[in-house]
Image (tube, grey):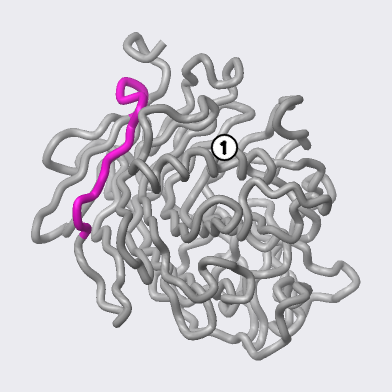
Amino acid sequence: MNVCSGSRLSHFDQSTTPVKSIKSRDGDVIDCVDSSNQPAFDHALLDKRSSQGNAKNSAIQSWQLDGSCPDGTVAVRRTSEEEKFKAYSLNYHGRNFQATLDAEINNIFSTTTSGFEQYATVSVAGEEYYGAMAFINIWSPEVRPNEVSSSQIWIVGGSGSDQNVIVAGWHVCFSFFKNKEIYYVYPELYGDNRTRFYTFWTFIIGSTRSDNFKSTGCYNLQCPGFVQTSKEIALGAPFLVVSDKDGLPTEFSLIIFKGHHGWELEMNGITIGYWPFSLFTSLNKNPASFVAWGGMVFNSQIDGKQSTTTQMGNGHFPKEGHLKGAAYMRAVQVFNESGYSRHLDSPKLFAPQPNCYSIKFGYNPDLGDYISYGGPGRNPKCP
């Protein structure tokens, strides 16, 4: 469910002058925007308010080596003119993920997917979930042009036209091709194949609104809605370090939870911001009804009818009983109404193409609940 789409300056009004701009060595530009003038407050349902959050000094994104944003500002990745939104890619995102989620929620994942997306996930459903967390292993998988590989947490509430989705994690996105039946395409989102931290949200999936889906959600800060509180983390910016198969693994902690003002996003102990309740219908007052963790590959090969060589995770299949070799998430937990985390009850594994991408779930005292997942894609057993 992870189509990448571009936008203008992260929906930041280009007539507004940033307090400071940082040119990153990786080519990105990070604008330090006055917190009261950030993209979120262009949304008709939101009021301007103070939004300065806590700060940590450990660098996890490349741009942090080249400068820092001053107090009273938030870090916004600048989107170039070449990355302007030219597509109804959210239409694609919505149609396919709605069909998959309907199956997931009603049948805890079906045995088939849309063909374009290939999943390896573990999920829970049937209770009230006030948040989810995991330590997520960071990799830089090999991704074919026009395709995506991602690792993420899904938070879902409601169903049908009242379905709300929040997603966060990392992804590698290349350019997108044209599929006349689903969406139109623009050149590329980031212009490279770096592993980047990203978010997505929507409140109505499969909407037929005539506003190019600008009001129903987006990636990162490409539309108003998400209220950023951090000057330390920029949505859409690349990670400074990824895991090395011959070295120590690199990971980050990710928490999404139902807070006082909305669904809050926290990374490595830094509160990045929140999606206000007023953005949503089902997730407005209610907890989530479905949570999932794992990987996704968007496959552009012959409309998804042929396997792709795009890797999930680090391209290795998981092995039973340990995390060595494949991508992983550890301390996989959900939160109850009191804010306490707990282990997963009756988790369901979903990997409909196990010869392409697979997943293992386990527990030990040091790691907690964990998943190990991924795969190379096309191989002799996955034609």
Dividing the picture into quadrants, the one containing residue 198 is bottom right
Q: Is residue 346 above or below residue 226?
A: above
Answer whether residue 231 is visible to the viewer in this image: no
Q: Residue furthest bottom?
A: 50
Residue 356 falls within the magenta-colored stretch: yes
Q: Position of residue 283 (x, y in %)?
A: 51, 68
Q: Residue at x 72, y 39 (%)?
A: 188
Judge from the rendering whether residue 218 lies leftward or rightward of residue 338; answer left or right. right
Q: Is residue 192 above or below residue 165?
A: above
Q: Nearer the viewer, residue 193 or 35?
A: 35
Dividing the picture into quadrants, the one containing residue 28 is bottom right
Q: Position of residue 287 (x, y in %)?
A: 42, 70
Q: Which residues are magenta?
A: 344-357
Q: Nearer the viewer, residue 62 or 42?
A: 42
Q: Position of residue 69 (x, y in %)?
A: 64, 78
Q: Residue at x 65, y 38 (%)?
A: 92
The dominant secondary structure in magenta is loop
Q: Give neighbour class at mark 1: few <14, some 14-19, many 20+ (Cα, 10 Å).
A: many
Q: Quadrant of the C terminus?
A: top left
- Disc 1 marks a residue whose amino acid type is Asn
Judge from the rendering whether residue 327 lies leftward or rightward of residue 227; answer left or right. left
The residue where tag 1 is placed is 96
Q: Position of residue 145 (x, y in %)?
A: 62, 27
Judge from the rendering whether residue 230 lies leftward or rightward of residue 187; answer left or right. left
Residue 62 falls within the magenta-colored stretch: no
Q: Secondary structure at mark 1?
A: helix
Q: Residue at x 31, y 25 (%)?
A: 354
Q: Nearer the viewer, residue 116 or 134?
A: 116
